[in-house]
Image (cartoon, rainbow, N blue to C red):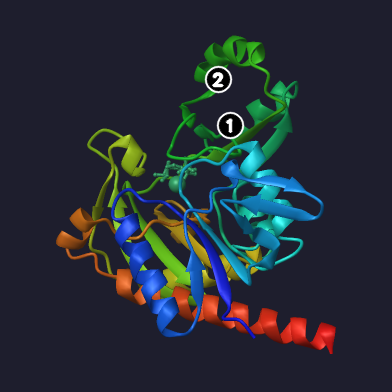
Amino acid sequence: MTAPHVGIWMYENGGGKAIEQKLVHALAERGIQSSTGLNLRDARAQGGQILCNGIVMEHLDAFLSYNAGQQTQYQLYLYQALSQSIPTLNNFASFALAEDKFRTSHLLNGHGIATADYRLCHKNDIAGLKAAIRDFGGKLVYKPTDGWGGVGIVKIDGEHALDMLLPFLSRTDLRYFYVERFIDYDNTDYRIDIVDGKCVGCYGRKAPKDDWKTNITSGGSVFVREPNDEVVELAIKATQALGLEIAGVDLIYDREQERYVVLEVNTIPAFATPEQEQLGINFNQNKLDAMVELIERTVVQKRALHSVKVA
Ligand SMILES: Nc1ncnc2c1ncn2[C@@H]1O[C@H](COP(=O)(O)OP(=O)(O)O)[C@@H](O)[C@H]1O
Ligand SMILES: [Mg+2]
């Protein structure tokens, strides 16, 4: 029997390359072979097989898709197709669910996990939108359901602001409005990294002065932050509800309703960059160890299943 073989597509910037090398090394120590750089953009599919950089993806024992850049429809299409044949991390169904802000909020609420109050309404349902602004205490956040990095997120400060925005919005080809209550919080958040059902790291992010978005791309900064039991428990529950193997859960404290809420669940949470490690954010090894365990268990299960099938 050949050694288990894992395919990896991992981000390389911000220290990603070094993390990948450590991962490959740790897997090799456990007798697991890796092939890196498997960008599905370079793949072709035919005859029941996806061929990527000379590798038949269906022959792999698992595929780790861990490139934080936005993926094209083509990459996602192949990721989905591949997930029908071999285990992928994350599994595609949960990945796609978590990538959608509405479906995530909807599912978490259904599981009794607090998020910002949200509303989805048809693009012509201006009455529904106006009612939302009243129901949510006068302030809304409009979000593209598939956005990232804080891009396209707009705060709407009352009905007048909404009226100003509507002529503009009606010219865009939106299908629906997804809005959330604007949460009164201290402009800091918790990022809790979960791997395999366990908390493997935590740090905080702070919005820049005079801004309310904590995204690094919006000018936010990271800081060392110890988690409390409540945020860890919420993060684990949210990850479980979505069915993700790996997640980075963002939480904030709602000062008005006096509770923590889950803001978003990221499917490809970045490791700490070398600069962030300098600040004392040092969960990388812990997270790497958990990912190695997860990958090993995944390939062992896959092999066991395969041997049952052929027996
Ligand atoms: N409902 C909200 N109330 C207050 N602030 C919010 C709300 N939703 C998002 N934010 C702020 O905006 C940032 C980006 O929102 P998020 O939903 O995480 O989208 P993205 O995928 O673009 O990161 C969050 O990190 C948070 O600081
Ligand atoms: Mg976010």
Give the residue displayed 37% in from the left and 74% down from the top: 25
Please indicate whether residue 169 sits to the left or right of residue 160 in the image: right
Label 2 lies in ligand 1 vicinity (Cβ under 8 Å): no
Residue 235 at x, y percent in the picture: 49, 67
Give the residue displayed 73% in from the left and 47% down from the top: 45
Label 2: which residue? 162
Closer to the camera in the image, 198 or 272: 272
Residue 135 at x, y percent in the picture: 61, 38
Kindly identify the amino acid type of the residue bearing the numbered disc 1: Ile
Give the residue displayed 31% in from the left and 74% down from the top: 285
Q: Are marks 1 and 2 in contact (CB under 8 Å)?
A: yes
Circle number at residue 75: none
Badge 1 element: helix
Q: Relative to 22, is 158 above or below?
A: above
Residue 266 at x, y percent in the picture: 50, 54
Question: Label 1 vs label 2: CA separation?
Answer: 9 Å
Q: Quadrant of the N terminus?
A: bottom right
Residue 132 at x, y percent in the picture: 63, 34
Q: Relative to 265, is 111 above or below?
A: below
Badge 2 element: helix
Closer to the camera in the image, 72 or 51: 51
Q: Is residue 57 visible?
A: yes
Q: Relative to 92, is 182 above or below?
A: above
Query: Considering only order in the chain, which callout, 2 or 1, is on the residue closer to the N terminus?
Result: 1
Kindly identify the amino acid type of the residue bearing the numbered disc 2: Leu
Specify few, some or many for label 2: CA neighbours under 10 Å numbering under 14, 14-19, or 20 or more. Answer: some
Residue 200, picture quadrant? bottom left
Circle number at residue 133: 1
Q: Relative to 8, is 26 above or below?
A: below
